[in-house]
Image (spheres, rainbow, N blue to C red):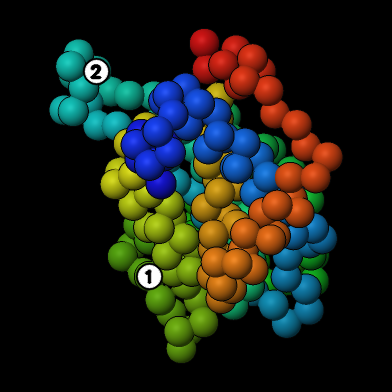
Amino acid sequence: MSAKQMERMLGVTYKTAWFLCHRIREAMDGAAPTGPLGGPNAVVEADETYVGGKAKNRATRKPAAKKAVVALVERDGHVRSFHVANVTAKDVRGLIVSHIDRASHLMTDEAPIYTRLGREFAGHSAVNHSAKEYVATGGFKHSNTAENFFSIFKRGVIGTYHHMSEAHLGRYTAEFDLRYNTRDMTDGERAAIILKGGEGRRLTYRRIDKLAA
């Protein structure tokens, strides 16, 4: 839900609604599951996407600076997504080895940043999207789970938020992660987890307003 909708529903200023939304996302970040994704006989997909407007939709017609998001998605499990400044082998490796169990089978596309990294896991498969390969080996080799998460994420960007500041993108990814990870829960169960995640986390308006400046 956008801050403008919260403003209308609660009868508060936009500034108050915007701050409230970020405090909820901060609690969602605190509610994120801990421990590595995957494990023996588990498949974890890694993929990246870019967030940002198109040049034709901008008054200046200049291309918008795209913001990179990397997602690690465990099949039939949880997701963790991160904003990264640069999609390089060094930066992405740090995320993957920190959040995925080395006993997992890593599934990626053909991007060269994953070539050496894949050797650090129990197995590594890659689909060649540039050759229009999307599913292979009896349906096992694909990155469609990660693509599905990105489709949900981008629908939120386009249909609800329209713009995500790079300074706060990490909280937006935390929101979409939690929504994905609690997809089988009731609203009441989800709310209880979010409230628990807010314990010990304090977010002040001055701090996030300074980041947005």
Q: Residue at x 47, y 22 (%)?
A: 15
Q: Amino acid at mark 2?
A: Lys
140 in relation to 62, above or below? below
| Image disc number at residue 134 | 1
Along the horizontal axis of the image, is 58 left or right of 179? left
Discs 2/1, front = 2
Report if residue 152 is visible in the image.
Answer: yes
125 in relation to 208, above or below? below
Q: Residue at x 56, y 72 (%)?
A: 186
Q: Earlier in the sequence, mark 2 or mark 1?
A: 2
Q: Percent position (x, y) of residue 202? A: 75, 31
As rendered, which of 120 and 8 lies closer to the eye?
A: 8
Q: Residue at x 45, y 84 (%)?
A: 139
Disc 2 and disc 1: Cα gap in Å? 32 Å
Q: Secondary structure at mark 1?
A: loop
Q: Percent position (x, y) of residue 114? A: 61, 53
Q: Amino acid at mark 1?
A: Tyr
Image mark count: 2
User: Mark 2 highlights which residue?
Assistant: 62
Report if residue 107 is visible in the image.
Answer: no
Crowd rating for badge 1 (residues with CA inside 10 Å; few <14, some 14–19, many 20+): some
Snapshot quadrant of residue 7: top left
Q: Percent position (x, y) of residue 134? A: 38, 70
